[in-house]
Amino acid sequence: MRIAISHTTRYRFDAPARYGVQRLRLRPRQCAVQDVLEWQMAVDGAVIEAAYDDHNGNATTLISFGNDVEEVAVTTSALVEVRDTAGMVGPHAGFMPLWLFTNQTALTKPGPKLKALARDFPLEDVNVLDTLHALSRAVGEVVTYEKGVTDVTTTAEQALELGKGVCQDHAHVFIGAARLLGVPARYVSGYLLMDASTAQDAGHAWAEAHIPGLGWVGFDPSNEICPDSRYVRVALGADYAEAAPVTSLVPGGGSAGLSVALDVAQQLMAQ
């Protein structure tokens, strides 16, 4: 399936920004399950300082702005061809050792509720894939999908205490529980083609776990499925902080109003 993405992020500062730096992870990954056919990025009110692949292999761009700028806009467009592999991404690759993804982070660090959840899914003498599918379903049940309750700093344990959250909370809970079971797990940020509308207010997030004999396999607790040809992978990391689409490294201009215009649509191929 070919998916066309148009994404604009606009920041309006309440005071003119004297200087700021942002790190962008917005370019879809070229990998075994998808091909990036087209890609463009434009910035308004800022300049591109550097572009590189980070330690997780994410295409990363640094932009800076200053001179009392009042607004910064980043616009990207992409055309990606995605294959349905039943969630299977392939063997582990890259600079980061596999064992590193068994380490908890500040966002996945387990407390009593996460430990209790993981205890319900022991891996001794069971099928690991089936167990992780069951874990994914359980995460969606114990954390009801609801916007506006959590933010990017909410931990897995806090989301469980609230019993509410969004896709990034589901991913963190799944990842934290999988790591408690000794399964390497990582966070994925990207896009999801929706049936109801092409216009969206945010990207999507899910998790991947490494299973012996299969490699990395994706799990989306928010939708209770493994990612298919509607999912576009952009960035990965140990948690949201390592895969965030936009991170302000040197914030400028006081507080900023954020607006997002995102369109994710299937592109039909000519016959």
Image (tube, rainbow, N blue to C red):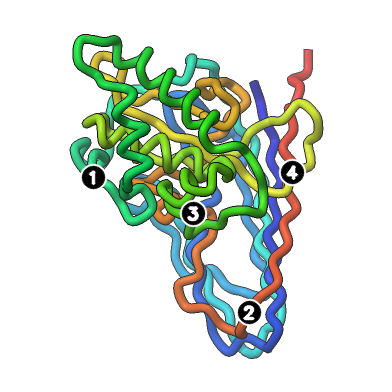
Residue 37 on image: x %, y %: 59, 34
Between 12 and 240, the one nearer to me in the picture: 240
Of the two numbered discs 1 and 2 on the same chain, state the one appearing first in sequence: 1
Q: Amino acid at mark 1?
A: Asn
Of the two numbered discs 1 and 3 on the same chain, state the one appearing first in sequence: 1
Q: Amino acid at mark 3?
A: Ala
Residue 169 on image: x %, y %: 50, 44
Label 3 sits on residue: 244
Of the two numbered discs 2 and 3 on the same chain, state the one appearing first in sequence: 3
Label 2 sits on residue: 255
Which residue is drawn at the image coordinates 47% and 43% (left, top)? 160
Label 4 sits on residue: 200
Regarding mark 1 in the picture, which secondary structure is present there? loop
Residue 6 on image: x %, y %: 71, 46
- Residue 28 appears in the figure: no
Given this view, does label 1 or label 3 mark the residue nearer the observer? 1
Regarding mark 4 in the picture, which secondary structure is present there? strand
Given this view, does label 1 or label 4 mark the residue nearer the observer? 1
Label 1 sits on residue: 103
Where 130 falls versus 242 (above or below)?
A: above
Quote the CA–CA distance across marks 1 and 3.
19 Å
Between 74 and 142, the one nearer to me in the picture: 142
Between 216 and 160, the one nearer to me in the picture: 160
Q: Amino acid at mark 2?
A: Ser
Q: Quadrant of the C terminus?
A: top right
Q: Amino acid at mark 4?
A: Gln
Of the two numbered discs 1 and 4 on the same chain, state the one appearing first in sequence: 1
